Image (spheres, helix red, strand yellow):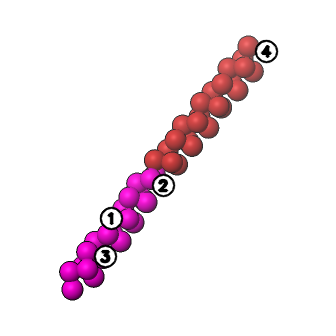
Amino acid sequence: MGSENDKMSRAERLAAKLRENLRRRKGQAREIRESDEQGLSKDDAGG
């Protein structure tokens, strides 16, 4: 039974790492997209 608990904890740790990585990548993509939009907005406002 001990190995079963170890597997669950390992699976839970892996799942948590995957969720954390996904959030980080989504955040980075969002920042890039927002910076692109802000760049376009600045050009529009200047003209």
- Earlier in the chain: of badge 1 and badge 2, it is 2
Crowd band around label 4 with a 10 angstrom C-alpha radius: few (<14), some (14–19), many (20+): few
- Tell me, yes or no, whether the highlighted magenta stretch contains residue 34: yes
As drawn, the residue found furthest toward the top would be: 2
Foreground residue, 7 or 41? 41
> Magenta segment, which residues?
25-47
* Residue pictured at 44% horizontal, 53% vertical: 27
Q: Find residue 26 and name its label.
A: 2
Between marks 2 and 4, how big is the CA–CA gap?
A: 38 Å
As drawn, the residue found furthest toward the bottom would be: 47
As drawn, the residue found furthest toward the right would be: 1
Between marks 1 and 2, how big is the CA–CA gap?
A: 14 Å
Using the image, determine if residue 39 lies above or below residue 30. below
- Tell me, yes or no, whether the highlighted magenta stretch contains residue 43: yes
Between marks 3 and 1, how big is the CA–CA gap?
A: 10 Å
Using the image, determine if residue 26 lies above or below residue 45. above
Using the image, determine if residue 16 lies above or below residue 4. below
Magenta-colored segment: predominant secondary structure = helix
Mark 3 residue type = Ser
Residue 38 falls left or right of residue 10: left
Asked if the residue at tag 2 contacts the one at tag 1, i.e. Cβ–Cβ closer than 8 Å, the answer is no
The residue pinned by badge 3 equals 41
Between marks 1 and 4, how big is the CA–CA gap?
A: 51 Å
The residue pinned by badge 1 equals 35
Residue 23 falls left or right of residue 28: right
The residue pinned by badge 4 equals 1
Residue 17 falls left or right of residue 8: left
